[in-house]
Structure formats: structure tokens, C-alpha cells
């Protein structure tokens, strides 16, 4: 069977790594190609993850880049359709809920190629969130559903999916977390520049923020920074900052207070080394909610809702 494995944005890379490892173990039955849509393109948002997570170089790179949602989605769809026309797979496997997930599943389905969705069935029921739209559309047309938590099963059954299509398999991202954690234990972590911050502060918090609902609006972002500033008086904070958030802080003239250390986005291993020993994670990320839950690190989710109910229960 020939499978196309799709990845485009940072949160996809840690999900495809363990899938590719599993495919490699079944190379007689499965041949696969990795398609990088290019949704994320900065080396520290993409290349470094391929290196550290030992993902082989993509077989195709669509170079989609940024732009509005429609521009980005359209570029991915056009590029991906061309590839499927000349090198048709039996199955397209998409992960998560980013624009690349949506774009490639629509193209595949319209070409009558089967679609498998990994991390299917999650719902925030908040349609102001672009990822919720991506999740709903992808699940509406997928053929095979790989589900990370029980709520995902419940949601998909309610939406009329047949039990035969649903596979409650746990979370590849958490498999990857434990795999990398073992590797981290063997590494010399003093090579990480953030090690000095860890040495200096026996207790600290880690922040990440990038949701449009938190960072695209000036009063909201100002108010979040004001709260972070208060927290940082008793708990120093370190904040690897997403390109979207950095751009908006500049535009809105927001300066962090002195106990909030802003740094560039980190590689998987350096970030893991930082948050696994944090007293608290403050985040609007989907993945980090689940990863901190898996390691028992308290996580304060800066959102009005979450599609990942397992992080609460
Ligand atoms: C995307 C995903 C989101 C995921 C997040 C993780 C969608 C709808 N959103 O949001 O679910 O949690 O990735 O990071 O797919 N940019 C760069 N360099 C990069 C990547 C982005 O400068 O490598 C800039 C873009 O040009 C754009 C902004 O950051 O201005 C946003 O990028 P985009 O891919 O549109 O969405 P994210 O906010 O990253």
C-alpha cells in the first residue's frame, strides 16, 4: 500500500515522527512518502524538528508559506493535487487540525483517494477557531479515524460515523514524547542556551501563546501580558515566542516586563528540557496541554474552551 503522510506546521512534525517509525517497521506492506506543505517555513519552526526527531527529508515540498487562510489553503491544494495526479497514493494520512490537514484531505477525497485522520474527533464547539473548522471538515470526509481520547469516539459516533471506521489508539504525540524523553536523558543538556535560565531559577513557568483569539487583538494581548507580568513577580517566566505573536507585539507596542524572558522558538528537545522541569505551563497550545498532562506538569490553559477534554479530566 502506498501512503502519503502529510505535515505542514510545527505541531504536525512530532505526530508524523512516530508514524514514520512504525511504517519503517512494515516496509514490506507499506511504502510511504512524506509531503511537507511548507505552511511553516522558518528553520526553527520546521527544519530543526526534522533533524531532532529523525524524520527523513520530505519526498515533496509544496513551499506554501504564509498568507491569508484562503491563499495558504489554495496553494497547498493546487500543489498537492498536481502530485496526486502524477504519483497517486492509495491513502492520504493527515494529522491534527492545521490548514495543511484540511487542504490535503479535501484534495484527496475529491480524487477518490482514501483519507485517514490522526487525532480525529476532537471538538471545541467554537467555530471562531480556525482549527475547529479544519477538524470538522476533515472528519466529515475522512474514511478512517485514529482517535486519541474517549471524547473523540463519543463526538464521532454522535456525528454518525460507523464504529468500524473508528480506532481508539491513543496519541502518537505522547508516544513521541516518551521516545524523545529517553533520548534527552542520554544528552548533555548544558549545550542548550536556556540551561542558564534553568540554573538561575529553581522555580519557573513556561509560556507559549499564538492563537489568533489571544494575540491578534491589541486589548486582549495587552491584558494577557499584564496578567503574565503580575504572575512573573512571584514566578519568573520564560516565553519562546511564535512568529505571529512577535509580529503582533511589535505592531501593538507591547513590551514584556523584566521577569518575562522572551526567546526565539525552541527546538523540540530544548523546549522539552525546559518545560519538563517547570512549576507551571501557561499556554494556548493544543499539544502542550496534552504533553504537560502526560508528565504531570500543571498547565494553565489560556483559552475559553478546549477540544482536548482529557487535559481537564
Ligand atoms: C498554525 C496552525 C495552528 C498551530 C500553529 C502552531 C492553522 C489554522 N493554524 O498557526 O493550529 O497551533 O500553527 O504554530 O493551520 N510564520 C513565520 N514563520 C513560520 C511560520 C509562520 O513567520 O515558519 C508567520 C506567518 O507568515 C504568519 C504567522 O506566522 O504571518 C502565522 O502562521 P500560520 O501558518 O498562518 O498560522 P499559525 O499561527 O502558525
Image: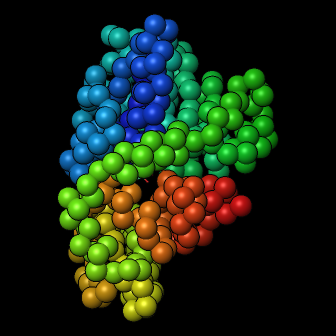
- Residue for point 29% across, 42% down: 52
Most distant residue in the top direction: 28
**At which x and y percent is residue 176?**
46, 42
Q: Exactly how many numbered labels are in the figure? A: 0
Which residue is more in the foreground, 298 or 250? 298
- Residue for point 73% across, 45% down: 150
- The coloring applied to the image is rainbow
- Residue for point 60% across, 70% down: 304
Which quadrant of the figure contains the C terminus?
Answer: bottom right
Most distant residue in the front direction: 186
Q: Visible in this render: residue 25?
A: yes
**At which x and y percent is residue 220?**
44, 79
152 lies above or below 81:
below
142 lies above or below 303:
above
- In the picture, measured across the screen, residue 279 lies left or right of residue 162, that is left
- In the picture, measured across the screen, residue 57 lies left or right of residue 15, that is left
**At which x and y percent is residue 109?**
53, 22
- Residue for point 53% across, 66% down: 297
Place residue 120 in its image quadrant: top right
Which residue is more in the foreground, 127 or 1? 1
Which residue is more in the foreground, 16 or 73? 16
Q: Visible in this render: residue 141?
A: no
**At which x and y percent is residue 50?**
29, 38
Place residue 71 in its image quadrant: top left
Amino acid at each position: 500500500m502506498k501512503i502519503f503522510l502529510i505535515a505542514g506546521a510545527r505541531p504536525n512534525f512530532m505526530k508524523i515522527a512516530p508514524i514514520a517509525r512504525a511504517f519503517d517497521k512494515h516496509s514490506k506492506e507499506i511504502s510511504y512518502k512524506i509531503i511537507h506543505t511548507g505552511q511553516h517555513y522558518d528553520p526553527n519552526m520546521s527544519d530543526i524538528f526534522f533533524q531532532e526527531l529523525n524524520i527523513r527529508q520530505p519526498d515533496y515540498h509544496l513551499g506554501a508559506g504564509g498568507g491569508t487562510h484562503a491563499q495558504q489553503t489554495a496553494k497547498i491544494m493546487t500543489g498537492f493535487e498536481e502530485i496526486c495526479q502524477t504519483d497517486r497514493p492509495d491513502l492520504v494520512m493527515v494529522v491534527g487540525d492545521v490548514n495543511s490537514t484540511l487542504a490535503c484531505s479535501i484534495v484527496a477525497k475529491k480524487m477518490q483517494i482514501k483519507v485517514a485522520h490522526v487525532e480525529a474527533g476532537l471538538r471545541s464547539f467554537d467555530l471562531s477557531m480556525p482549527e475547529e473548522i479544519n477538524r470538522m471538515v476533515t472528519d466529515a470526509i475522512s474514511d478512517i479515524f485514529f482517535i486519541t481520547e474517549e471524547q473523540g469516539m463519543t463526538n464521532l459516533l454522535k456525528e454518525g460515523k460507523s464504529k468500524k471506521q473508528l480506532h481508539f489508539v491513543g496519541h502518537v504525540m505522547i508516544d513521541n514524547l516518551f521516545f524523545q524523553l529517553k533520548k534527552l536523558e542520554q544528552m548533555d543538556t548544558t549545550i542548550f542556551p536556556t540551561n542558564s535560565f534553568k540554573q538561575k531559577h529553581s522555580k519557573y513557568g513556561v509560556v507559549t501563546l499564538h492563537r489568533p483569539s489571544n494575540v491578534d487583538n491589541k486589548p486582549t494581548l495587552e491584558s494577557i501580558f499584564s496578567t503574565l507580568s503580575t504572575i512573573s513577580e512571584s514566578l519568573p517566566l520564560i516565553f519562546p515566542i511564535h512568529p505571529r505573536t512577535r509580529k503582533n507585539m511589535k505592531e501593538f507596542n507591547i513590551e514584556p516586563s523584566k521577569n518575562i524572558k522572551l526567546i526565539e522558538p525552541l527546538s523540540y528537545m530544548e523546549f522539552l528540557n525546559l518545560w519538563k522541569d517547570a512549576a507551571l505551563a501557561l499556554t494556548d497550545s493544543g499539544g502542550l496541554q496534552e504533553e504537560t498532562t502526560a508528565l504531570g506538569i500543571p498547565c494553565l490553559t489560556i483559552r475559553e474552551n478546549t477540544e482536548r477534554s482529557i487535559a481537564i479530566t
